[in-house]
Image: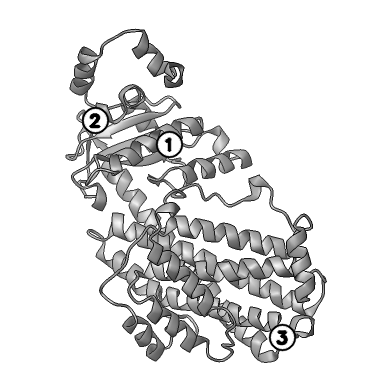
Amino acid sequence: MELRREGQMLTPTTDSAILKQVLASHTDHVCEFDVFPVINLTEQILIQAIECSTGAVLGAEEWPQTTKRASGLAELDVNDTVMIHRLSRELSGICAHGYADEKAIELLNILSSYSWHAKVALALSGFALNFGKFCLSVQPSPADALSKSLAQLRKMPHLGGLFSPLKCHFDKLKRLVRASLDITKCIAEIWNLSLHYISEDKSDLFDENNALIPDAVYWTIKSVVTCSSQIDSIKRLRNEYIPSSTEASELSTVAVTVDSIREQLKNQLDKCYEYIEQKIINQYLTFSGEDNLPIDHIDMGIQRRKHMLLLISDLSISEEEVQVLERLYKDQTMRSEGLYEMVWVPIEGKSCSNYSGQRKFKKLKSMMPWYSFQHPLSDPKLTNQIKEDWNFKDRLIVVVQDPQRKVSSKNAIHMMWIWGNSAFPFTREREEDLWKTQIWNLETVIEHIDPHLLD
């Protein structure tokens, strides 16, 4: 089962008979939940487990940026938590050599009522529980006396031998785990972009996404089954374990296909980003005449009938500013349909090209729950136009456009700092009304400087 190229399209990698079973396992009654907090926690577990198994210790600066969408895990439904533990049990103690297809279909049937991106997120989370415990047992932390003693009692193999066959085999297994994690993140992001930005106006791209995802979900779950089966062999045979030719071949075959799917999904994700950002540029950042009306009136899906807030800045925007805007953004999304949508349009500056600038860009982007451009805007014609028409001078500005895409404020940031969402829709008339009703006294001044002074 390998990827086949037809023209510029990559067709599904799964055998047609198996693919029919994969699609048949999915029901129309779909359980939905926010998968990103689960994926973020799963990523932390898997990365730490992989590093732990090699004896390495991650510094704080080396951790993956998973701040974005990190909240909400506490709101995970108890049934979803039960499902994660059930999948963990299903993946424990299995011997699926030669039967990984059947086991993957079995897991998909268990997950039949979940959306495709939720299926793969839950399956990987169940695997992460087992993988984390296993890696702690083969390479316990020197500072953790309990795990070290338990590992000695269990007589688990030590993977530190540089050239041991077991270590080489386990290194391949870890690479497959990383690839499965990458695919899961891509699937979730493509699903999210399709739902919010693509579905209603770009049917061909939307259809491509829908065609790719079930195949990718199947192979990710199959890779999890393959890893679980081989980990079980290591646990049972301990230091006597030597990978058989069948196990080595099975791992290599799955790894080759999964690597190909990962690249395919990354390319597809880039296509989604390119399409969305071009639409944002066409609709919100391209002007005609003095009215600053967009040339291209194409709806942005979820942004339809909403105000659009364009956060325009270079990398001088502070984390504290982002945190305040994040609170305002989340507060307004709690309403039935929300008041507005945000997009961060970073403008390329001198610091963007160096290493520290790139790290800061990634960190700021990871903190933002709204859509952000994947790279700072560098087109001189467009950036000069933004500077001239909206008086952008490096510092953060928030340009507000109403649902008809007419600019209602060239910079509403001061209104947001003073009144928050009470200043919506951030027009000059609304600002004047707020100033008229504002009662000025010492308490008002202190509240805007530091509310905690009133405590």
* Numbered badge on residue 380: 1
Name the amino acid type tagged 1. Answer: Pro
What separation in Å lies between label 1 and label 2 (alpha carbons)?
32 Å
The residue drawn where x is 48% and y is 85% is 103
Q: Is residue 180 left or right of residue 207?
A: right
Horizontal and vertical percent for residue 332?
29, 39
**Which is nearer the N-term, disc 3 or disc 2?**
3
The residue drawn where x is 28% and y is 31% is 421
Q: How would you rate the neighbour count of disc 2 (Cα within 10 Å): few for under 14, some for 14-19, many for 20 or more? A: some
Between 276 and 369, the one nearer to me in the picture: 369
**Which is nearer the N-term, disc 1 or disc 2?**
1
- Residue 25 appears anywhere in the view: yes
Q: Quadrant of residue 356?
A: top right
Q: Is residue 215 left or right of residue 64?
A: left
Closer mark to the observer between disc 3 and disc 1: 3
Between 295 and 455, the one nearer to me in the picture: 455
Name the amino acid type tagged 2. Answer: Phe
What separation in Å lies between label 3 and label 2 (alpha carbons)?
64 Å
Per the image, the residue denoted by label 3 is: 243
Name the amino acid type tagged 3. Answer: Pro
* Numbered badge on residue 424: 2
Closer mark to the observer between disc 1 and disc 2: 2
